[in-house]
Amino acid sequence: YLLSLSCWAFLCFLLEFLEEYFNGYAWKVIWIIICIWVACAVGNIESINRTFSLSRTIVFFPYVLMGKYFPTNIDLKKFRILGILIGGISLGVLIWLQPIIPVEFFYQADAYKTIGVEYGEIVRFLTYLIAIGFGFFLLVIMPKKRFAISKIGIHTLWIYIFHAPFVLILREIRFWENEFLYIAFLVAVVIMWFLYKGVQWREKLYRIV
C-alpha cells in the first residue's frame, strides 16, 4: 500500500506539472478516462499482477484522481434523491454480477485470465461505475453535523495500514464459519477501537519525546 501511495503521489505531481500545458476541467475528465482505459486494458497482461502491487497501483489510481479533482464547492444535498436512486442501481448491478464474478476479482491484484474472468475489461469498467455510484450515494447522504465518532475519521489511514496483522490472525483461527458471521461486526468494531486508541497513544508519545 505504501509503495502504491508513493507512486500515486508521484503521478499526481507529474499531472500537476502537465496541467500547466493542459489546464481546465475538461482535461481533468480526460485524464480520468485515460487512466480508467489503461486500468481496464492492463488486466489482459499476466505479468502485471501482485508483484510490487503493480496491478492495484494502476487500477486504483483513477479513484485517487477522482478524489483529487472532485470539486468541493458543490452542494450535494440537492441531489439526494438522484444519489439514492443511483446508489440503488449500483447495488442492483453488484447483486447481478455477484454470482458470476469471483470475489478475488475485486482485489484487482491479478490478471483476468489468472482468476478466470471473461470479458474482464467490461467487468472492470462496470466496477468503476458501481464504485462511482456508491461514492455519489455516500456523499449525498453524509451528514454535515459532527457526531461523537466523527473524530475517528482522521485516523482511518492508520487503521487501514495496521489492520493486516489482525486479519492474518483471524484467518489462522478456525472459527465456526456460519456462527462467526453474527459476531463479525462486533469483532471489527473492537479492532477499529483498539487501533484508534493505539494511534492516540502514538501521538501522545511523540509529544513526550
Image (spheres, grey):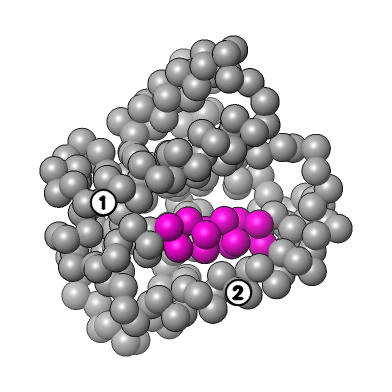
Q: Which secondary structure lies at badge 1?
A: loop
Q: Is residue 70 left or right of residue 112?
A: right
> From this viewpoint, is residue 106 visible?
yes
Residue 38 found in image quarter: top left
Q: Position of residue 172 (x, y in %)?
A: 17, 65
Magenta stretch: helix, strand or loop mostly: helix
Task: Please give the residue where the numbered disc 2 appears in the rendered image.
Answer: 89
Q: Residues within 10 Å of mark 1 (few under 14, many from 20)?
A: many
Nearer to us in this view, 123 or 72? 123
Task: Please give the residue where the numbered disc 1 appears in the rendered image.
Answer: 43
Q: Position of residue 18 (x, y in %)?
A: 52, 16
> Spatial distance from mark 2 to mark 1, Cα to Cα?
26 Å
Nearer to us in this view, 104 or 145? 104
Q: Residue at x 50, y 42 (%)?
A: 33
Q: Which secondary structure lies at badge 2?
A: helix
Nearer to us in this view, 185 or 90? 90
Q: Magenta segment: does it hold 107?
A: no
Q: Residue at x 41, y 21 (%)?
A: 10
Q: Are marks 2 and 1 in contact (CB under 8 Å)?
A: no
Q: Position of residue 158 (x, y in %)?
A: 45, 40
**Region in magenta:** 125-137
- Amino acid type, mark 1: Gly
Q: Residue at x 37, y 26 (%)?
A: 6
